[in-house]
């Protein structure tokens, strides 16, 4: 039995009719064609599917689609505005904070959630915030540097 | 140079930070079918019967295949595998049948309706046991398989390759020694853990030709293996690799591609997709082979190593089509980066009933260096010498000879060693941050060469557009290492144009030109050379036309800032874009046509080694040398190890993009740290016990050490701008450096990986009960 869900997706109200066993990740990817969030494990272990739910970073593979009803969901696709990148996205590029790119959308969303809550995090806070997002390529250093760059800029302004 | 050597941003950055890049699992086609795979519950069993009728009858099921649909053997170096099991299963998890259905749920449900009758067979679950004469044979038909001439299988045994080094006079070498020391080590199976699991889609066209989208590092090598397996001519099989979400070797060969193609042949043009689960990725793609090492060394009191006798026994798993070459690499590099006059090495690949061993970043080097570099420290202690000094005495230098007798041409090992010793402040003892914590420092050297057949080829095409922009076509795949960016930098430098004017296209065997494989830390070197040759071709054409246009001899013309200009007459020149479609003559006629550059490359003069002795003048294209030092802290109450600091220095010949190569090395260090401290695919009676990120931990941001990354640049004579590869070498010394630091901290030698807190604590307790 399908159920209707209404929620805010990347700033716009949307509706879907969805089987109750389907995950939020599956709905985003298959129904809304938003494939930025990735399935790396399907069990909340790798963080590649991280999206913001009411501004909190969550593993979309662990949330049922029907639970999204009434919530505000932000995916990586909602960060940039047309060709204009979010400051965090640009900083990831400037710092070479990505390699294969598969963890990058989830990584950026975790870091974004931190910066929304705390615009001037310390390095320890950054590390903690992204420690649920596995990256096999970068060794994390340049990712932390990218986020700290924004933190330092915010501190200066 | 204005572009090579600068940290331009990655050209694929925007697509990746916006989530816009489509990886294979992100691709969706109308009418697409989904696949589930029936897998073996046993490590070793004869297949008596497979009955698929129940699954075929299920509503929504469109095709079912078994091993009988894919009878041909395939493989890169040794054709020992079929994509689904035919006569027997050789590891737990091997594909036996597969279903394509309207939804993934239906495909998965259908598996329960496939009945497979097995007769269990005794399994080989330890490579050393597998060598014994009474061991069950994993491949009784080995003698009938095809293999390349540089591999030495022994039919009638479980040995699929026995690679030998016989250099100098080993007995004499031991006689000259003051001490003879023998040590043994073990390196367990680990998994690549790319964040993207394998994924592939196949579709058959009306004429029977197949298009395959696969998350693969090497579309051409994949095409070749699949054409053998399915009797498909190469012009009827198109392989597209749209993007790769991390490879590390695991996506170099063929795995699930061989399952979707036979299904697609039965689905009347409907595309068929299979994406691995994380558990599949751990067990059913590739794993890094386990390895048992014994090293017997003769050393003189003055620190000079006079003889080394190595036995490396590799747990190749159920199929070693790729693994045989890792064993060969482990053989020809078996001394590590040291100049040792007398060497005897047996590097042996053994079939077991374990998951399939395959290429993993380092390609044997990480495994052998874990043994070699600890052994060096143990020798140093034996003769009362510092770990730095013994490496200085024995380390390779230009003019020295490596294990194959090759004379070393370029080698910055000693410079790297000095740099690392300085940055890790090796001789300074540090005290722990708390009373129950102790510090230690360790150092390890490493080297690696591209482990590939001698004559592997690369090519590149550059097309000039009417506005002076370019398209660069290659099949070198950017799997995260940054090759798209680096190849553009090289081309931009060669053509004297801004990098933004070049768009790169990769990974489509119908449209992008041949590249053997994206493996072996070879792309910067091999594909880079092909790109430079394509640029030379373009340059030659442009100068020819400009000579006619300007009336200046082409000897006196150069490419400069998007113009062809005279070196002699200031201001005389023509914009390159005006020549893009050829040259318009004064009478209105035209000549030449569009400017298209073609480049091809094979590493020069790489030759086979002697079959009996493994000796040869130039067995590899180049060697990359380097060193890493670490500082760690061990909690003696819990056994937990924190890696605080890593200093790294490699001789890369020429840094093309400082920011990208730094990132690559940082990634290699942390991957090496994972293999040192946490990672092991635990196999009990052939069954993987921890195929998930819950039970198999890889490093998180919290495990990241401080990293100091340096390079020296002794140019590679045949390298593009002098460059050589470093993608794999940078992982190689990390684990042994940590192990050496553990010894420095607590006086306990850890002979096997991973060095978990449990192992450390147990060893500490044993040590204190002995004292």
Image (cartoon, rainbow, N blue to C red):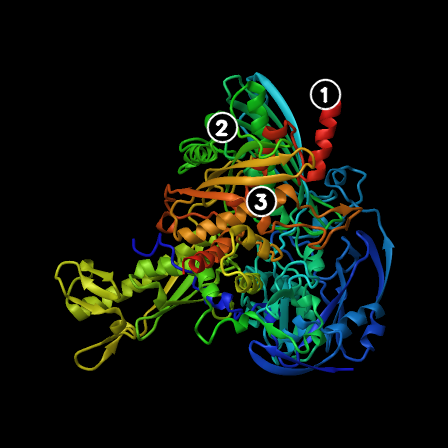
In the picture of the structure, the residue carrying the numbered disc 1 is: B771
| Residue count near mark 1 (Cα–Cα under 10 Å), binned few <14, some 14–19, many ≥20 | few
Is B184 positioned to the left or the right of B97 in the image? left
Q: Position of residue A114 (x, y in %)?
A: 55, 61
User: Horizontally, is B512 left or right of B31 in the view?
Assistant: left
Label 2: element kind: loop
Distance, label 2 to label 1, CA atoms, is 27 Å
Q: In the rendered view, would you say B62 is above or below B658? A: below
The numbered disc on residue B428 is 2
Give the mark nearer the N terminus: 2 vs 1: 2
Spot occupied by residue B378 in the image (x, y as percentages of width and height): 59, 26
* Nearer to me, B192 or B431: B431
Identify the secondary structure beneath mark 1: loop
Whole-number angstrom distance, CA of label 1 to CA of label 3:
33 Å
Give residue B498's quadrant in the image: bottom left
Give the residue drawn at x 71%, y 31%.
B763
- Closer to the chain start, of discs 3 and 2, is 2
Residue identified by numbered label 3: B672
Residue B510 in sight in this render: yes
Q: Disc 2: which chain?
A: B
Number of numbered discs on residues = 3
Q: Quadrant of the C terminus of chain B?
A: top right
Which badge, 1 or 3, comes first in the chain's sequence? 3
């Amino acid at each position: 039995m399908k159920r209707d869900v209404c929620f805010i997706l990347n700033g716009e109200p949307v509706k879907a009719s969805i089987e109750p066993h389907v995950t939020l990740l599956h709905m985003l990817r298959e129904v809304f064609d938003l494939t930025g969030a990735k399935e790396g494990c399907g069990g909340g272990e790798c963080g590649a599917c991280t999206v913001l739910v009411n501004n909190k970073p969550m593993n979309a593979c662990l949330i049922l689609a029907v639970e999204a009803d009434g919530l505000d969901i932000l995916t990586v696709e909602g960060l940039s505005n047309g060709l204009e990148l979010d400051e965090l996205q640009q900083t990831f590029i400037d710092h070479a904070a990505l390699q294969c790119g598969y963890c990058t959308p989830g990584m950026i969303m975790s870091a974004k959630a931190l910066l929304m809550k705390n615009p001037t995090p310390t390095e320890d806070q950054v590390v903690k915030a992204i420690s649920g997002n596995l990256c096999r390529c970068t060794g994390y250093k340049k990712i932390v540097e990218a986020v700290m760059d924004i933190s330092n800029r915010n501190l200066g302004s | 140079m204005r572009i090579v050597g600068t940290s331009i941003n990655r050209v694929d950055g925007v697509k990746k930070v916006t989530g816009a890049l489509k990886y294979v699992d992100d691709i969706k086609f109308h009418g697409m079918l989904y696949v589930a795979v029936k897998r073996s519950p046993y490590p070793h069993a004869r297949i008596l019967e497979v009955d698929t009728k129940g699954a075929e009858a299920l509503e929504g099921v469109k095709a079912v295949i078994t091993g009988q649909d894919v009878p041909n053997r395939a493989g890169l170096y040794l054709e020992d595998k079929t994509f689904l099991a035919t006569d027997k299963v050789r590891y737990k998890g091997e594909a036996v049948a597969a279903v394509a259905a309207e939804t993934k749920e239906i495909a998965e449900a259908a598996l329960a309706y496939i009945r497979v009758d097995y007769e269990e067979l005794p399994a080989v679950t330890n490579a050393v046991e597998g060598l014994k004469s009474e061991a069950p044979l994993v491949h009784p038909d080995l003698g009938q398989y095809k293999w390349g001439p540089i591999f030495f299988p022994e039919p009638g045994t479980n040995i699929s390759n026995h690679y030998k080094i016989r250099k100098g006079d080993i007995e004499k070498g031991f006689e000259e020694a003051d001490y003879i020391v023998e040590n043994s080590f073990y390196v367990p199976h680990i998994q690549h853990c790319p964040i993207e699991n394998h994924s592939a889609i196949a579709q058959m066209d009306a004429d029977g030709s197949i298009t395959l989208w696969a998350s693969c590092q090497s579309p051409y090598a994949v095409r070749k293996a699949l054409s053998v397996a399915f009797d498909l001519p190469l012009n009827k099989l198109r392989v597209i690799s749209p993007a790769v979400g991390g490879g590390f070797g695991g996506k170099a060969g063929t795995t699930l591609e061989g399952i979707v193609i036979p299904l697609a042949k039965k689905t009347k043009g409907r595309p068929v997709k299979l994406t691995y689960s994380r558990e599949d990725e751990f067990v059913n793609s590739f794993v890094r082979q386990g390895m048992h090492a014994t090293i017997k060394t003769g050393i003189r009191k003055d620190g000079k190593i006079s003889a080394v006798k190595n036995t490396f026994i590799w747990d190749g798993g159920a199929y070693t089509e790729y693994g045989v070459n890792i064993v060969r690499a482990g053989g020809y590099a078996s001394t590590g980066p040291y100049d040792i006059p007398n060497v005897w090495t047996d590097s042996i690949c053994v079939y077991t009933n374990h998951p399939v061993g395959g290429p993993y970043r380092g390609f044997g080097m990480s495994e052998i260096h874990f043994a070699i570099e600890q052994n060096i420290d143990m020798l140093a202690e034996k003769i009362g010498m510092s770990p730095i000094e013994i490496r200085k005495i024995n380390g390779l230098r230009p003019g020295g000879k490596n294990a194959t007798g090759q004379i070393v041409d370029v080698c910055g090992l000693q410079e790297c060693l000095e740099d690392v010793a300085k940055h890790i402040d090796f001789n300074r003892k540090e005290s722990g941050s708390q009373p129950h914590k102790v510090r230690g420092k360790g150092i390890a050297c490493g080297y690696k060469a591209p482990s590939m057949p001698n004559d592997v080829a690369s090519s590149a095409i550059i097309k000039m557009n009417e506005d002076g922009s370019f398209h660069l076509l290659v099949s070198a795949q950017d799997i995260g290492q940054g090759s798209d960016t680096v190849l553009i930098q090289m081309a931009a430098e060669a053509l004297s144009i801004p990098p933004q004017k070049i768009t790169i296209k990769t990974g489509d065997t119908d449209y992008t030109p041949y590249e053997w494989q994206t493996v072996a830390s070879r792309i910067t070197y091999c594909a880079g050379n092909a790109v430079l040759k394509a640029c030379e071709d373009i340059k030659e054409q442009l100068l020819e036309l400009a000579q006619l246009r300007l009336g200046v001899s082409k000897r006196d013309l150069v490419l400069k800032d998007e113009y062809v200009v005279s070196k002699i007459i200031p201001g005389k020149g023509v914009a390159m874009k005006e020549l893009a479609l050829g040259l318009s003559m004064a009478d209105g006629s035209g000549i030449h046509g569009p400017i298209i550059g073609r480049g091809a490359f094979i590493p020069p003069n790489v030759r086979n080694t002697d079959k009996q002795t493994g000796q040869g003048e130039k067995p590899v294209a180049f060697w990359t040398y380097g060193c890493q030092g670490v500082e760690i802290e061990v909690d003696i109450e819990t056994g937990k190890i924190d890696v605080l600091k890593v200093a790294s220095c490699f001789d890369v010949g020429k840094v093309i993009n400082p920011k990208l190569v730094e990132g690559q090395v940082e990634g290699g260090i942390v991957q090496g740290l994972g293999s040192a401290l946490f990672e092991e695919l635990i196999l009990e009676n052939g069954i993987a016990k921890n195929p998930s990120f819950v039970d198999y931990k890889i490093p998180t941001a919290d495990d990241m050490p401080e990293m100091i990354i340096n390079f020296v640049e002794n140019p590679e004579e045949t390298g593009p701008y002098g460059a050589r590869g470093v993608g794999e070498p940078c992982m190689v010394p990390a684990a042994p450096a940590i192990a050496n630091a553990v010894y420095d901290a607590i006086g306990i030698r850890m002979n096997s990986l991973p060095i978990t807190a449990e192992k450390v604590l147990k060893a500490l307790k044993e040590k204190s009960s002995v004292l």
